[in-house]
Amino acid sequence: MKIHEFQAKELFEQYAIPTVRGKICKDQDSAAIAYSEIKPKAAVIKAQVLTGGRGKAGGVKIANNEDEVRQKTKEILGMNIKGNIVNKVMIVPAYPIKRECYLGMTIDRNKRCVVVITSKAGGVEIEEIAAFAPQKINRYLIDASIGIPDFKARNIALSLFDEMDQVKQTARVIQNMYRLMLEKDASLIEINPLIEDDKGIIIALDGKMTFDDNALFKHPDIAHLAELSDEEIKENEAKTKGFSYIQLTGSIGCMVNGAGLAMATLDLIKLYGGDPANFLDIGGSSNPQKVIEAMQLLTSDPKVKVILINIFGGITRCDDVANGLLAAFKQIKISVPIVIRLTGTNEDEGNKIIADSGFIRSEDMTQAIQKAVELSKI
Ligand code: GDP
Ligand code: MN
């Protein structure tokens, strides 16, 4: 789970990581009010979206007076940054920057430990530095049984600053970040840029954090920060109905029983040149209500041009599934073609039941999928 910059900075403050907090504004008027506490100094207006690279996209702007604050807030609100629409900005006092660098912490999955990443080339995205100047990136693996003692923290900080004053400040930032990482089960903390201001003070000007979803139950304070995307809201709804559902970007709506078969179905769709609209495992039940709910889920996605039902009857009997489908389709109207493959226990009985239903039937999985791909391209 990702959180916004302003939320990350609240956590930084709780963990004594020096940062600049601002006011969150959703319109020009509140931005102007926020600026009244900053003026006559300059302010930075920052888009609050759950993605990086805001600066480059024009989502971070400096304003020198109230008119500029209003104008730039207007420009940034509504902006689309990598698919995220900006609906709030943070107004912060602008800091004079003497040096910008990068300080990040994440999990090294191969080494199974936390890794601290530093670079003097801060400001731009770390992915770019990694691609074009990998020698400018330093990595420090942290032994979990030792943590980051003072000498190690200073050693890491020395990769960013030369003067002892800044090294000591940065060492504390690193130790506090590590505490934050462990105590809140974060999987990433990124400060880019970490700056030295004109008075020699070290400050986190930006903050990005990601948390381990599987640990969120331990941290209600973090879990409640979640801002769900439309996609995640739909996926959670599906979860409450007992489905495992993941929205994808294609046009073939899939309803499959069993996660393994569902994955194989998606693989075959791709193999035959199609694009799945979702992953949906309806589990072992043939309950008509479940089929209705699954169909409603699939048809609520306007991208879906064809529905592919792939059922392998094991414990679930095909005739039960067929009856469930018929009952379901009496209750809901579907305007897209439906391709169905029903095999396994009691398949003859099952296929007889849906013989006159108007579904496009196929006993062969490959044929069914090829047919669905073909129909998705019309
Ligand atoms: P990102 O592009 O999403 O990572 O957003 P950042 O918060 O890192 O902002 C992008 C860039 O804007 C930074 O690298 C800085 O160069 C600049 N910036 C952000 N805040 C300030 C500030 O308070 N003062 C100054 N002078 N520049 C800032
Ligand atoms: Mn940044």
Image (tube, rainbow, N blue to C red):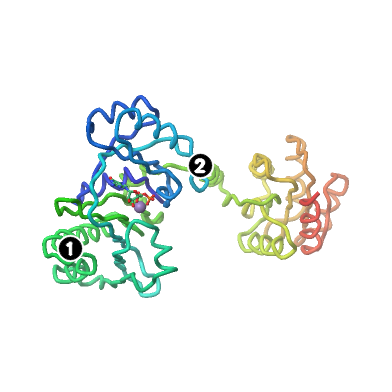
Amino acid type of the residue that numbered disc 1 sits on in the rendered structure: Ala
Q: Position of residue 155 (x, y in %)?
A: 19, 71
Q: Which mark is drawn over residue 307? A: none
Amino acid type of the residue that numbered disc 2 sits on in the rendered structure: Asn
Q: Nearer the viewer, residue 23 or 162?
A: 162
Q: Where is 99 relative to 60, above or below?
A: below
Q: With 324 as the anchor, is 88 left or right in this view? A: left
Residue linked to disc 1 = 171
Q: CA distance from mark 1 to mark 2?
A: 37 Å
Helix, strand or loop at mark 2: strand
Q: Position of residue 39 (x, y in %)?
A: 23, 31
Residue at position x 73%, y 34% in the image: 331
Q: Quadrant of residue 142?
A: bottom left
Q: With 75 as the anchor, is 41 left or right in this view? A: left
Q: Position of residue 351 (x, y in %)?
A: 83, 53
Q: Where is 87 relative to 134, above or below?
A: above
Residue at position x 15%, y 60% in the image: 166
Q: Nearer the viewer, mark 1 or mark 2?
A: 2
Asked if disc 1 is less than 8 Å from ligand 2, the answer is no
Q: Quadrant of residue 29?
A: top left
Near mark 2 (Cα within 10 A), the count class, few <14, some 14-19 or many ≥20, is: some
- 1 and 2 marks in contact (CB < 8 Å): no
Helix, strand or loop at mark 1: helix
Q: Nearer the viewer, residue 151 or 160?
A: 160
Q: Nearer the viewer, residue 376 or 121?
A: 121
Mark 1 or mark 2, earlier in chain: 2
Q: Residue furthest left?
A: 165
Q: Position of residue 188 (x, y in %)?
A: 35, 58
Q: Which mark is drawn over residue 80? A: 2
Q: With 295 as the anchor, is 193 left or right in this view? A: left
Q: Residue furthest top?
A: 29
Q: With 296 as the anchor, is 111 left or right in this view? A: left
